[in-house]
Image (spheres, rainbow, N blue to C red):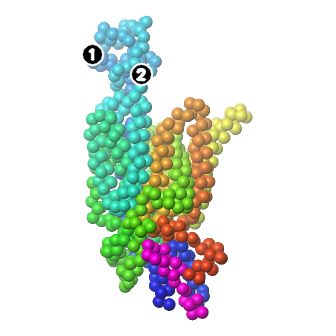
Amino acid sequence: MDRYKRYRSMKMHQSSVKELPLEDGKQKHQSDDEEDDIISAAIGNFGRWQFKLTFLLSLFNIPCTWHIFAPTFHAAPRNHWCGRPAHLIDVPVTKWINISQPVDECSIYNVNWNNYSSKDFIDGTVSTVGASLVPCTQWEFEGINAETVVSQWELVCDKKQLINIAEMMFLAGVAIGGFVSGVISDRYGRKRTLMGSVTIQTIIGVCIAFCPWFELYLILRACLGFISVSVVFSGFVLTMEIVGGHWRTIAGCSYLFPVPLSYITISGMAYLLRDWRDLQLAISLPGILFMTLYWVLPESPRWLLATGKKMKVLQILQEASLYNGRDLPDNIDKQLEVPTLQTDGHQSAGVADLFRTSQMRRNIFFLFIIWFSVYLVYYGLVLNISNIGGDLYINSVLSGVVEIPSIAVSILFLMRGGRRWPLCLTLAFAGVACLLSVIIPTIADYFDSDVDIQWLKTACAHMGKFSVSSSNAVMPVFTAELFPTVIRNLGVGASNVSAGIALMLVPYLWNLSEMDVRVPMGILGICGIIGGISVLFLPETGNKPLAATVEEQESPVPNSPHKEKKQEETFTLQNPTPNITIIPTSNAMA
C-alpha cells in the first residue's frame, strides 16, 4: 500500500501511464489541466512567476528579428549612375545620364571627359559619335548623405550578387548555429547559453556598425546569424520548460508575438535612421538591457532536474512557489530524489541520442522535411509579397500586422485540435494557396479570358502567407514536445539545420522565374503539401507531459484495451536505477 502511494507521488516518471487504477477499482483519468509532473505539481502549471518569465523571454525575439530583417534596409535599392568626374560635378544628373550612359547604369561612353566642361553639357556640344561603351569604374547614388551597404561598397552591376551572398552568410550562420547552440544548451544549461549568446550578439552587432571592409561585414554577419538563432532557441526552450499543461501551448505560441511587432518597430527606426550604420547601432545597443536580465532569469528547473542538480531545483521551486503564492509539498526533497535522470547511465546526452532509437530517427527525419517546407514557403512568400511594389516601409509594417492575428489563431487551433492536425492543415493549405496562384492564371490564359485576375493571385498569396505564418507558430511548440528534456534544445537546433538550408535557397528561388514565372510559386506549393503530409507521420504530443529522458520518450503509451489491462498488472518506473515493480493495492489485497 505504501509503495503504491509513493509511486503515485512520483507520477512525473510515468509519462507513459495515462490511467491509474484506484483502490476501489475505478480509474483516474488525467485531465488537460492536471499538473503532469513534479515541477508543475510544486509551483503550478502557470502563475505570476511563469507569466513574468515568459513575457521577458519573448522579448529576446525583438533584437534577433531586427538583425534578421535589417538587410532589407541595409541594402535598400537606390538609384545610381556612373559617377561624374570632379570637374563635371555641377552638370545636372539627368543631362549627364542621357549623354554619357544611354544604355544602362553599368556602362558609359569611352570618351575623354576631361575635354569637356559643364558648359558644354548645358549647351549640348558634347559629342559621343563613334564612341564605344565601357564598364563604369565609379558610381554615384541618390541621397548619398544616407549610406547603405550598397552605396558604401558599390554593390552594383558586377558586384550586385554580393548582396545575396551577404544574406546567405547570415543564414548559413543560422543553419549551423541552431545545431551547435542546441548541443551547448543541453550540456551547459538554457540560461547560460541564452545570456552568453545575447552578450556576444550585442558585441557583434555594434562591431558591424563600425565595419570598414565588406569582407569583414560578411564574416560578422555570419557570426551574428550563428549567435542570433542561439538566443531564439534557448529562450524558446526555457519558456517551454517553466510552464506546464495546456499553458505550454499558449506560452509557446505567445513567445512569437514580438516577432511581427519587431517588423513594425524596425520599419519605423529605418524610416528615421536612413544611414545603415546608425540603424545597426540602434538595433544592437538595446542588447545591453537584455544582458541585465541575467540576475532575473532562472535556469530551467526541468533541465536541472534532468541533470541531477537537486539543490538548485529546490532553490528555484522555493522562489517560484513564493511568487505564485503556493506552498511546496512537505516531502518535495524526497520526490526529487528519484529523477537523477541520465541517458544509459551517462551524465549528459549528445548528438547520437537523436538517432539512437527508431522512433527518434523517424521523428528527426520528418522534422527535417517539415522545417525545410515551412521556412521555404514562409520566406518565399514574404519575398514575393515584398516585390509587389509600393513603399518599402509600409509593406514591412503590413507584413507584421498580418502575422499578429495568425499567431493568435494558432493558439486556438492548438487548444482545440492538438498539434499534428493544425500544423498539417495550415501547411498544406499554404501549399494549395500557392498552387492556386499558378493554376488560376493558367486557366484564364487557356480560355483567353480578358478578366483581370491579378487580385485573385494576390489574394492567394496573402492566404498562403497567413496560413504558413500559423504553421510557423505551431511548429516550434510541436518540435520541442517531441524531444525529451536531455536533448530538447539539441533536437530543436538540429531541426533548424534544414530550415537554414531553405533560407539560403530562398534568395535564388525567384531566379527560376526566368524559366517560367509559375515555377517559384509551384515549388512553394508542392513543398507546402509535402510538408503537411509529413506531419501525419509524427506522434501527437498535445496535453501530454514532457518526457525527461529518451527512455521515457520511447516508453509505450497505453492506447488499447490490451495494454491498459497489462498496465493494471504492473507498473515499472523508468529511471537509471534498477526497475521497481509496484503491485496495485487491489491486486495485492486479492
User: Residue 79 location, x and y as percent?
Assistant: 40, 28
- Is 12 placed above or below 116 here? below
Is residue 360 visible from the viewing direction of this image?
yes
- Looking at the rendered image, the disc whose residue lies closer to the viewer, 1 or 2, is 2
Question: How many other residues sit within 10 Å of disc 2, few (<14), some (14-19) or many (≥20)?
Answer: some
Q: Which sits in the foreground, 521 or 48?
A: 521
Q: Amino acid at mark 1?
A: His
Is residue 268 covered in magenta? no
Which quadrant of the view contains residue 87?
A: top left
Q: Residue at x 63, y 40 (%)?
A: 438
Q: Residue at x 42, y 11 (%)?
A: 132
- Is 244 placed above or below 446 here? below
Q: Which residues are magenta?
A: 571-590
User: Residue 420 location, x and y as percent?
Assistant: 58, 60
Which quadrant of the view contains residue 208?
A: top left
In this rendering, position of residue 374 left or right of residue 74: right
Q: Residue at x 55, y 60 (%)?
A: 358
The mark total stands at 2
Query: Which quadrant is the C terminus positioned in?
Result: bottom right
Label 1 element class: helix
Name the residue beneath numbered marker 2.
Answer: 106
Which residue is at the far bottom? 589
Label 2 element class: loop
Name the residue beneath numbered marker 1.
Answer: 87
User: Residue 424 location, x and y as percent?
Assistant: 59, 56
CB within 8 Å, label 1 to label 2: no
Q: Amino acid at mark 2?
A: Cys
In this rendering, position of residue 290 left or right of residue 5: left
